[in-house]
Image: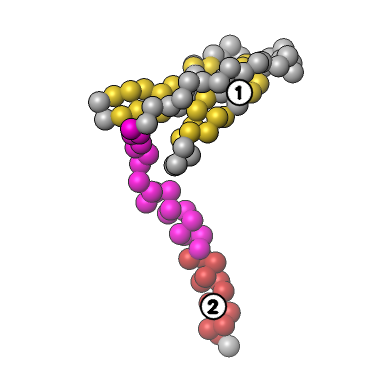
Amino acid sequence: MRSTRFVPGFAALLCGCLLCAAPACAAPRGRLYLRVAPPAPLVQVRTVAPGPNVVWVGGHQRWSGARYDWVPGRWVVPPRPRAAWVSGRWVQSRRGWYWVDGRWR
């Protein structure tokens, strides 16, 4: 009887520990180099801004593991006043093409 009560509690504790430890064990994000150049960005018409305090974040080509997929642009509320969006971009190096994420400045 005693072991039956202990096992579910132990299983919950073990799952909790594994979930907390997983990010620490994960490999750091590295660059993924692609031999195939990204296609040109699509021309996207901006819609009217939905409010006065929004910033346009343009679309980009994203590598899906087998091909490039278009991620459309969108209006976003900045994280702080006067924040500026620096767009992500594809960079070519001698190892291939890699993506640099966009960020708030």
Task: Name which residue lies at 35% across and 28% down.
Answer: 97
Q: Mark 1 is on which residue type?
A: Gly
Q: Circle 2 sits on which residue? A: 6
* Range covered by the magenta-colored residues: 15-35
Q: Mark 2 is on which residue type?
A: Phe
Outermost residue toward the left?
94
The one of 21 and 3 positioned closer to us in this rendering: 21
On screen, 33 above or below 84? below
Which mark is on residue 73?
A: 1
**Residue 17 is inside the magenta segment:** yes
On screen, 21 above or below 63? below
Task: Name which residue lies at 53% across and 17% down.
Answer: 85
Mark 2: secondary structure: helix
The one of 20 and 78 positioned closer to us in this rendering: 78
Identify the mark nearer the N-term, 2 or 1: 2
On screen, 14 above or below 2? above
What is the crowding at mark 2: few (fewer than 14 residues within 10 Å), some, or many (at least 20)? few
Where is residue 9? Give x, y as percent. 55, 71
